[in-house]
Image: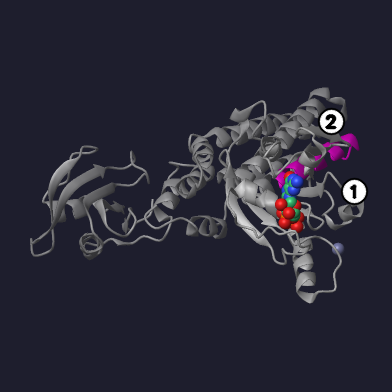
């Protein structure tokens, strides 16, 4: 436990009915005593007057005292709920500092909760994600992490790994008996099963990351096929300029929208084509660049003209493409979708809205939101994905060593590294540097 006592405003600055100053650390009780004349009974709201050092009234309100270890941080915590005015709260906070507390850094309460074992790193991050959530879906998924859904899946994996390690390392203890690991069938099957779980977790985490950061959708295609019209239809506004002069959209238009709780970062690109106009050339250049950062490209073309298949080369390799065959109203078709060579084509009409729902469903599928097991979805960060990917690589290496009969030491070593990497996700293994980076992004007072 850390020695000093921290304090911060826990509610947003500005006017409000109530504002809360939160204090954590060994001096919490002494601060309560100095300001209120008594220490509130643990976990009971106590009404009182908050006084300055001359005994003069600063404010009156509720005080809550949570002695260690049953508090958010695991330390003694005091919460002073005063009136929500910036000056009065500042006076309360100053009084706490006068009484020996220091101003908390952003995220320092959560960091202490982590360091004192009240939360693992995933849960601490979930606190920040919950606060920053911009959709109800994001709140729900961050809440699941706070409740330990993601952590449990990591813990289960670690448990599996430990079992395999015990098995492998047992053979190391008897070098004379010359046990060949490859002849131990359960090791290979257990390893394969663990690897499969890591793969599934990577997929789920990737979806979770999309829900946290938004699906980057780039609308691309030849001029005049209805890209800007599609963007407008998805946004529900007249945001982009729609004209029938090819090449109107010279710059990228970006919009943050949400489709049933899925945040989407939409980018409309200038018509992808070769042009002499320098401004338009710049637009085309940016369109190419945007396509390279996309999670999915909506490749729009018009039903009444040929699709320029050569455009495919301008989309990044491996990036999912949804083909949008627009303007089917001109051919009197009704909306439908087909799958060809693993690529979905949706026939729709932006003009009359027929088929837009099909498109939205496809977009949600990109974030795993139509999955058969929605309970498998949780919020994830790049950090988690990165660690899962490294875990996968270590397990893959262990599998290869096993198959090539490279010796139990090498297999054991990779398994140990895999376990350690998983431990980085929950925070079992961390560096000060990593913690600093994670908690610095938190808001003040959390
Ligand atoms: P962009 O250059 O690809 O962004 O295309 P726009 O969105 O500017 O649209 C070009 C023209 O096609 C405009 O006149 C639109 O009104 C028209 N358009 C867009 N979608 C449809 C559609 O579904 N049906 C029909 N008939 N016309 C459409
Ligand atoms: Zn080009």
Residue behind mark 1: 306
Q: CA distance from mark 2 to mark 1?
A: 59 Å
Pointer 2 or 1: first along the chain: 2
Residue 206: percent from left, percent from top: 67, 43
- Residue count near mark 1 (Cα–Cα under 10 Å), binned few <14, some 14–19, many ≥20: few
| For residue 79, above or below residue 371 | below
Q: Is 184 colored magenta in this rendering?
A: no
Q: Is 407 colored magenta in this rendering?
A: yes
Residue 376: percent from left, percent from top: 62, 31
**Dot in front, 2 or 1:** 1
Note whether residue 173 is visible: no
Residue behind mark 2: 181
Image quadrant of residue 8?
bottom left
| For residue 212, above or below residue 268 | above
Could you tell whether 139 is left or right of 301 in the image? left
**First to last magenta residue range:** 389-411
Residue at (16%, 46%) from the top-left corner?
39
Query: Taken as a whole, is the magenta stretch helix, strand or loop?
Result: helix
């Amino acid at each position: 436990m850390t020695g000093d006592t921290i304090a911060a405003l826990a509610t947003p600055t500005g006017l409000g009915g109530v504002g809360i100053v939160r204090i954590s650390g060994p001096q919490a009780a002494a601060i309560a005593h100095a300001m209120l004349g008594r220490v509130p009974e643990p976990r009971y709201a106590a009404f009182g007057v908050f006084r300055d050092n001359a005994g003069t009234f600063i404010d009156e309100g509720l005080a809550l005292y949570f002695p260690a270890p049953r508090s958010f941080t695991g330390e003694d915590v005091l919460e002073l709920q005063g009136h929500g005015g910036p000056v009065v709260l500042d006076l309360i906070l100053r009084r706490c500092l006068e009484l020996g507390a220091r101003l908390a850094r952003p995220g320092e309460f959560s960091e202490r909760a982590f360091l004192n074992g009240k939360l693992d790193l995933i849960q601490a991050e979930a606190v920040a994600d919950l606060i920053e959530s911009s959709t109800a879906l994001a709140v729900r998924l961050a809440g699941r992490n706070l409740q330990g859904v993601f952590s449990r899946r990591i813990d289960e994996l670690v448990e599996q790994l430990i079992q395999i390690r015990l098995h492998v390392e047992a053979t190391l203890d008897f070098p004379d008996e010359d046990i060949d690991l490859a002849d131990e069938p359960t090791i290979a099957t257990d390893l394969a099963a663990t690897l499969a779980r890591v793969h599934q977790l990577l997929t789920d985490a990737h979806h979770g990351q999309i829900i946290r950061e938004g699906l980057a959708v780039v609308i691309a295609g030849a001029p005049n096929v209805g890209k800007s019209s599609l963007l407008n239809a998805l946004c529900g506004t007249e945001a982009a300029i729609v004209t029938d002069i090819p090449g109107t959209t010279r710059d990228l238009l970006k919009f943050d929208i949400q489709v049933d709780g899925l945040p989407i970062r939409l980018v409309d690109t200038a018509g992808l084509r070769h042009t002499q106009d320098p401004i338009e050339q710049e637009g085309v250049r940016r369109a190419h660049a945007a396509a390279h950062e996309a999670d999915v490209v909506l490749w729009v073309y018009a039903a009444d003209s040929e699709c320029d298949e050569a455009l495919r080369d301008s989309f990044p390799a491996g990036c999912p493409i949804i083909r949008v065959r627009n303007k089917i109203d001109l051919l009197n078709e009704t909306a439908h979708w087909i799958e060809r060579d693993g690529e979905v084509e949706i026939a729709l009409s932006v003009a009359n809205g027929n088929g837009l729902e099909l498109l939205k469903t496809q977009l949600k599928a990109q974030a795993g939101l139509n999955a058969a097991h929605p309970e498998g979805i949780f919020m994830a960060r790049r950090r988690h994905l990165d660690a899962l990917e490294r875990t996968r690589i270590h397990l893959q290496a262990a599998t290869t060593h096993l198959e090539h009969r490279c010796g139990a030491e090498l297999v054991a070593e990779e398994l140990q590294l895999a376990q350690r990497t998983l431990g980085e996700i929950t925070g079992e293994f961390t560096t000060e540097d990593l913690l600093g980076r994670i908690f610095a992004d938190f808001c003040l007072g959390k």
